[in-house]
Image (cartoon, grey):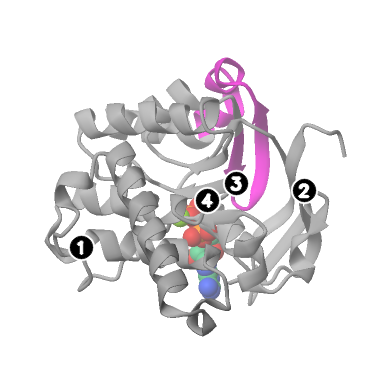
Amino acid sequence: MSVSVLFRIEDLLVQFGGLRAIDAFSMEVEQGSIHALIGPNGAGKSTVLNCVSRFVTPRSGRMVFDGRDLLAARPHVVTRMGIARTFQNIELCREMSVLENVLVGAMSQTPRYLPFLPGFARGRIERDAVMQAEALLERTGLLPFRDAKAADLDFGRQKLLDLTRALAAKPRMLFLDEPAAGLRNAEITALDALLVDLVRGGGLTIVLVEHVMQLVMSVADHITVLNFGRRIADGGPAEIRRNPDVIEAYLGTDAHAAG
Ligand code: ADP
Ligand code: MG
């Protein structure tokens, strides 16, 4: 593996009953890049992410993160290795506050011996966690809603909170499942700037599953295209935009629909 590749999928096969949801799929993600994974509905994009989170077990193939075999790792170990994700259907603790949701995201980083520490030490760690959560909320623009109930946020802010919660785990690599879906234009522009800042300024590596082509073409360094579980194209945005297979399978229809 070349030194600049942080994450690699090799020859992945996922089968649901008789359906080959992912078939002979490979991709390589360079450290410090935004790598978009696109394709029509049902192409298998979320399934790839579910393999990374270990919710779905592939029939065969390999997934390697920073030289470590992900398929050999238990799900909680994947988080501790520095991998975080968001979900296509937002997964928040709806009755908890915005701040509490971010603290839940940070919990994978808190020491397991926390409950056994004397009160003063525990208090300091907890205060630090709150300060870090507030700093993150400031970065994503949600600090004014710190004490609001997650369920009371509008849709765009719930998606942003899902992203903030994922960032609280201090990941090295972040998988985003359609973060721009349902967002208004101004929110997409803000998300665009945030993703670029996280990668260029924060050293994060991002895999972006997304239908909103305006965002993909603007932020992606590299694009992989899936159709019926198979990779049909792989390359830079300009190359992908004029690839006839991609236009036929995807851009021709969805780019129109997205207007
Ligand atoms: P995408 O995210 O690209 O829209 P998905 O990965 O969600 O596509 O789905 C790919 C295919 O696999 C679809 O045909 C879907 O119905 C099927 N699929 C996904 N998850 C499951 C599951 N847990 N059980 C059975 N079929 C599934
Ligand atoms: Mg999906």
The residue that disc 3 covers is 173
Labels 4 & 1 near each other (Cβ < 8 A): no
Query: Relative to 179, is 138 on the left or the right?
Result: left
Identified by mark 3, the residue type is: Met
Crowding at dot 4, Cα within 10 Å, few <14 / some 14-19 / many 20+, comes out as some
Identified by mark 1, the residue type is: Ala
Query: Separation of disc 3 and disc 1 at Cα?
Result: 25 Å
Closer to us: mark 4 or mark 3? 4
Q: Nearer the viewer, residue 212 or 121?
A: 121
Reading the chain from its start, which is encountered first: label 2 or label 3? 2
Q: Quadrant of residue 162?
A: bottom left
Point out the stretch of residues depicted in magenta: 224-248
Labels 3 & 1 near each other (Cβ < 8 A): no
Q: Please give the label number shown on residue 170.
A: 4
- Asked whether residue 90 is in view, the answer is no
Closer to us: mark 4 or mark 2? 4
Q: Please give the label number shown on residue 66.
A: 2
Label 1: state its secondary structure.
Answer: helix
Q: Where in the figure is residue 129, as x and y percent of width and height? A: 40, 59
Query: Relative to 150, is 135 on the left or the right?
Result: right
Q: Please give the label number shown on residue 150.
A: 1
Identified by mark 4, the residue type is: Lys
